[in-house]
Image: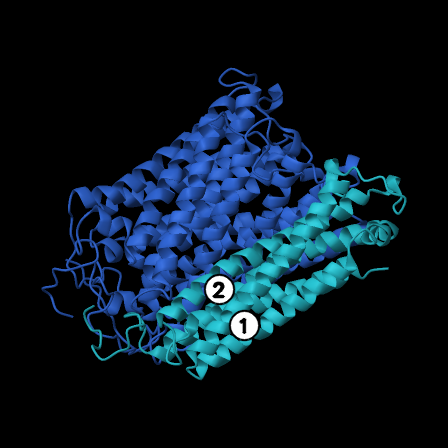
Amino acid sequence: MSNHNPDAPKHLKHYFANVDQQYETSKFAMWAFILTEVLTFAGLFVAYIVFRSWYPDMFVDAHKLLDVNKGLMNTIVLITSSLTMALAIWAIQKNNRKLSLIMLIATFVFAFCFLGIKFLEYSHKFEVGQLPGEYYSYMGPEVVHLNNPHIFFSIYFIMTGLHGLHVAIGMGLIAWLIYATYKGNLSSEYYTPMEMIGIFWHLVDLIWIYLFPLFYLIG
Amino acid sequence: MSENIKQNYLNHPKGLMSWLLTLDHKRIGLMYLVSGILFFFLGGLLALVMRMELAAPGNDFISNDTYNNVYTLHGAIMIFLFIIPAIPGALGNILLPLMVGAKDVAFPRLNLASFYIYSFGALFAMYTIINGGVDTGWTFYTPYSTQSTSNVVPMTLGIFIIGFSSILTGLNFIATVHKMRIPGLTWYKLPLFVWALYGTSLVQITATPVLAITMVLLMLERFLGIGIFDPALGGDPVLYQHFFWFYSHPAVYIMILPAFGIISEIIPVHSRKKIWGYKFIAYSTLSIAFIGFLVWGHHMFTSGQSVFSQIVFSFITYFVGIPTGVKIFSWILTMYKGQVSFTPPMLYALSFLFLFTIGGLTGIFLGAVALDIHLHDTYFVVAHFHYVMQGGTIVAFLGGLHHWWPKSFGVMYNQTIAKICAFGVFLGFNGTFFPQFLLGLRGMPRRYATYSEEFVELHSYSTFWSGILGISIFIAIMNLFWSFIKKNKVDPGSNPWGGMTLEWTHTSSPPHPHNFEEEPVLEHGPYDYDKVIVEKTYK
């Protein structure tokens, strides 16, 4: 690279003037990306609002079929994972690589628990036929069947499914962070990837914090 | 600037892999340009097939079903594979870092990824064609799109994938504009093309996610029957239209804002005069981007909206006319008492002013509810959006290519041929689409392969001129690429139009692999023709 300073740190890309500019650029772009994520979910929140205002009673009926305890457990698990993620960043800022590694692994485990609990919820719904659209077959006494309860489950599965996909992607990113931290590629000098993935992880948490009351706690 | 520059981004480094894996924004821009133009030709060919069929009433050239496929593919290819990716992807990529004095975009790797995501999405679109097409129209309205047996899923999947490319390019550009400017290059000293790309990128990152989720819902509706858009299952097909237009109306501004930016560069340079109302133009870009999000309902005046929402959407739609008018008047005032030279880029810019104004004014017709009820789904709408999209965006794109061709690639095209083609495009375009306004007013509906006898005169007129238009565009673009083959090189230090922005004053033509041999120092604003004299140097 023609005019690259040989004393510059290894992680500094040649097209940035200095480390600060590189860090600020990453952080700025990450927040812009968070905006696109919010808008992705916004479309689905609009669908939720539309159908809930069309079928308010059905939503109240259908939400009783969800398992509030599992939902609450997932909320606690995910909030805790947000905390451990933040602690991992705090630890790497203090150059405490070991603590950071432990916290990342904890975050990964919590994320795994979240998906595990979600899997239990989903598999129960598949068994009893509380499914989206055409596949809905549940005939229990709790819901009025002429009132389109399958729409509730369509929206439930799409929104929690897309959120679950984000959790899974987040797990992949955290696994990579664990590897990078273990290898010693991240330190208090350079921890941009961890902070960026941290921002993403908090967003994933935040979306769940909206999903939980909107599906599990209505009526 | 030294005169003996041998190394530039086109010849260094060498080899196929150095192109396929390049992180250089200029090479990525060139790859976008070539693929964009190929899709432009493909979409154009489909348009000519349609005009052939419409030369006379009856199904004498292609069948109704083929016609449905042809217009759907024409629309989808032109919009999603050419117009939306091409200007930001090609001209934006090549010029944005140069204009802000950066060595590259903020995330070069992401930039290359955007190109490959775009290519990957385009493969699905191509598969659609090979596999027998898609017949829903480029808007994929439900319920037909959930029932049609044609290739709705590959096409929407392609559009979904290309959406990510669009989002990533937008992110990259926004970060570049915010963080990669050289010291001293403040917001109000940015070239207006940068402002335009910035506004475009904002719309790209905020509207495209909604399109992505809409396409996902449409695919789920087809695969799983989720019922959200299906009235039989308690859903609402009009909700699809809301989702679709919430993206696709702002997408109109993704398509036109970069064109505004190009015109804002061409007019002051070729009039050798400071741009009139710099801040007005800059802020009108942002206000168009913003208002664009509030007017989607005007596509749905006949879809069963309440009268109240019709009035609100109609009212807000008129607001788009204000910042747009501000731009048009600013450009005209820039030319006033300037030294206007009728170079090929300027001829395209003048065509743009004329054609886009017609497109914009007929948009006001369509924004009025009462008139729109009559004109909806007629050729009036077809003519209107072609005046905006082709007369506006594509004419500006051609102008931009002619303007920055010697800069980007270090070769000069035959200017006489370029001027003749510019006239050909202008005449051919008006000949093709002006009759369509009249057809629409007389009630000719869009998307039909045949029509009743009374329309034959205007239709055959339109078909005749579409041939002239097609040939002119083809020769214009061939003329550009021919300059590569003829190796009609310009001097590396040349500035044929006397541009004042960094890409003209501080780097060679074609630019150095790292853009600038040394970090550029800003000496004057982008259009300070009243303060500094920049010589036109060519050869």
Is residue B165 shown left or right of residue B24?
Answer: right
Quarter containing the C terminus of chain B: bottom left
Q: On the picture, is B513 further left or further right than B330?
A: left
Q: Earlier in the sequence, mark 2 or mark 1?
A: 1
Q: Which chain is displayed in blue in the rendered image? A: B
**Could you tell me if residue B340 is visible in this image?**
no
Percent coordinates x, y for residue B476 in the rendering: 31, 41
Tag 1, which chain?
A
Q: Which residue is drawn at 60% across and 56% down?
A: A40
Q: Residue A142 carries which label?
A: none
Which residue is the site of mark 1?
A85
How crowded pointer 1 is (Cα within 10 Å; few <14, some 14-19, many 20+) is rated as many
Query: Which residue carries the number 2 mark?
Result: A174
Image marks 2 and 1: residues in contact by CB distance under 8 Å? yes
Residue B176 coordinates in the image, percent (x, y): 40, 68
Is B71 in front, or is A190?
A190
Kindly identify the amino acid type of the residue bearing the numbered disc 2.
Ile
Chain ID at mark 2: A
Which colour denotes chain A? cyan
Q: In this view, does B306 lie above or below B45?
A: below
